[in-house]
């Protein structure tokens, strides 16, 4: 197990769509362990997607302690949003885009299907914070960052302020 480096915007790999996991083997177990280590190392992060550590595989992890009462570690392989409804404002940040936070629109309720780390089919109904984190992390698997969902005015502010900071 090891903490890995988190790629930062505008790294090219963050814009690349990730490939579905075909076989759940030791490499995937190591990847998931490393992702949790990386996430737990950072007190701000509640979720992480594999491309953020340079692996373009469809794997996400979520620190469930923060977003649900029951699950402590949520790892989903090949997650898919199978149902969505409603809309909510979502205030977000991203470990790959330090020190920038903004509000975007997200679905208010979703159902997510995928596989757990042992290959068992799992399903989540997500509302509120968990709903927001799932959408954010699954977006990463499609090469989409939350700043790609900013309204034009906010995007301008992001580009201005972020360029200044870096
Ligand atoms: Ni992110």
Image (cartoon, grey):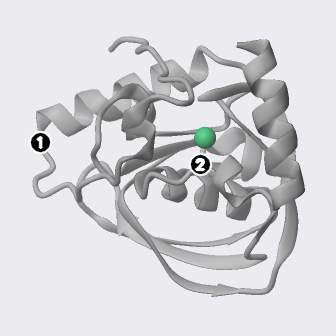
- Provide residue 80's location: percent of width, then percent of height: 42, 72
Location of residue 158 (image quadrant): top right
Helix, strand or loop under label 1: loop
Above or below, comparing residue 72 to residue 36 in the picture: below
Q: Which residue is mark 1?
A: 25
Q: Earlier in the sequence, mark 2 or mark 1?
A: 1
Q: Is residue 47 left or right of residue 119?
A: right
- Provide residue 48's location: percent of width, then percent of height: 53, 38
Q: Residue at x 70, y 64 (%)?
A: 131
| Number of residues whose C-alpha sits closer than 10 Å to that of mark 1, classed few (under 14), some (14–19) or many (20 or more) | few
Q: Residue at x 22, y 38 (%)?
A: 28
**Does mark 2's beta carbon lie closer than 8 Å to ligand 1?**
yes
Helix, strand or loop under label 2: loop
Closest to the camera, between mark 2 and mark 1, is 2
- Provide residue 17's location: percent of width, then percent of height: 34, 54
Disc 2 from disc 1: Cα separation: 28 Å
Q: Is residue 37 left or right of residue 51?
A: right
Above or below, comparing residue 161 to residue 72 in the picture: above
Location of residue 33 (image quadrant): top left
| Number of residues whose C-alpha sits closer than 10 Å to that of mark 2, classed few (under 14), some (14–19) or many (20 or more) | many
Label annotation for residue 145 = 2
Quadrant where the C terminus lies? top right
């Amino acid at each position: 197990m090891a903490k890995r480096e988190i790629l930062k915007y505008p790294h090219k790999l963050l814009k690349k769509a990730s490939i579905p996991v075909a076989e759940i083997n030791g490499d995937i177990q190591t990847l998931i362990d490393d992702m949790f280590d990386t996430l737990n190392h950072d007190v701000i992060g509640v979720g992480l997607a594999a491309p953020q550590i340079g692996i373009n595989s469809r794997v996400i992890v979520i620190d469930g302690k923060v977003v649900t009462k029951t699950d402590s570690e949520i790892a989903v392989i090949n997650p898919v949003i199978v149902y969505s409804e409603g809309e909510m404002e979502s205030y977000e940040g991203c470990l790959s885009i330090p020190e920038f936070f903004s509000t975007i629109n997200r679905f208010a309720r979703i159902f997510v299907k995928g596989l757990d780390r042992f290959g068992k089919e799992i399903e989540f109904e997500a509302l509120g914070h968990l709903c927001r984190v799932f959408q954010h992390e699954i977006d990463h698997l499609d090469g989409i960052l939350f700043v790609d969902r900013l309204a034009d005015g906010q995007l301008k502010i992001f580009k201005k302020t972020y360029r200044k900071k870096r």
